[in-house]
Amino acid sequence: MSDQCVFCGIVAGNVPNAKVAEDDTTYAFMDINPGSDGHILVVPKMHSKDLFDIADNDLTDVTLTARRIAKAAVVEFGADGVNLLNCCGTNAWQTVFHFHLHVIPRYIDKSRDRLVLPWQPGTTGDKEIIDALGSQLSATFDRRYPTSDD
Ligand code: 5GP
Ligand code: ZN
């Protein structure tokens, strides 16, 4: 737990929040600034700052909780779909540095849903760049980025 971290404060019960669920390792609560009605955050109870910092077991647990929450949100809120989102790093929109997955229910009814796709759908990319970047990673991926078990 980090003294400076607002999500650690929420998990500890020191910061007011609208709790949705918790288990031994994860905690889910309503986002204070929702992108759509029912926007929920799922966090590990153990502090980790981002996707690269979180332990494998916490990442697994948070992902599984997020899937359960997503299912519940779709059924209980009558959502038409759901997005899971993680922002890793300031330049990727991360503002709170305690790992979290956003569970964002989506609605055909736009009065309940303020999200817009941040890239242009249906725009074909530059094939040379796509292929070059794919080859660059595939050439060394398994050797340089092994799983934690390796
Ligand atoms: P990020 O930008 O890091 O991906 O997401 C951080 C999220 O945390 C934002 O959606 C923001 O609204 C939410 N948030 C920040 N501070 C608080 C808080 O004190 N309480 C709650 N419930 N949500 C918060
Ligand atoms: Zn924290």
Image (cartoon, grey):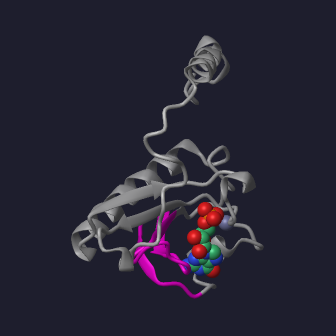
Q: Quadrant of residue 131?
A: top right
Quadrant including the C terminus:
top right
Pick whichever, 14 or 109, lies toward us: 109
Query: Can residue 24 be seen from the camera position used here?
Result: no
Q: Quadrant of residue 110?
A: bottom left
Compared with 36, 149 (above or below) is above
Identify the residue shown where x is 56% and y is 60%: 100
Q: From this viewpoint, which residue is outermost toward the front?
A: 123
Identify the residue shown where x is 49% and y is 32%: 124
Residue bounds of the magenta highlight: 16-42
Residue 130 x %, y %:
57, 23
- Ligand 1, image quadrant it occupies: bottom right
Compared with 145, 74 (above or below) is below
Left or right: where does residue 75 sit relative to residue 53? left
Residue 39 x %, y %:
44, 72
Identify the residue shown where x is 62% and y is 17%: 132
Left or right: where does residue 84 sit relative to residue 3? left
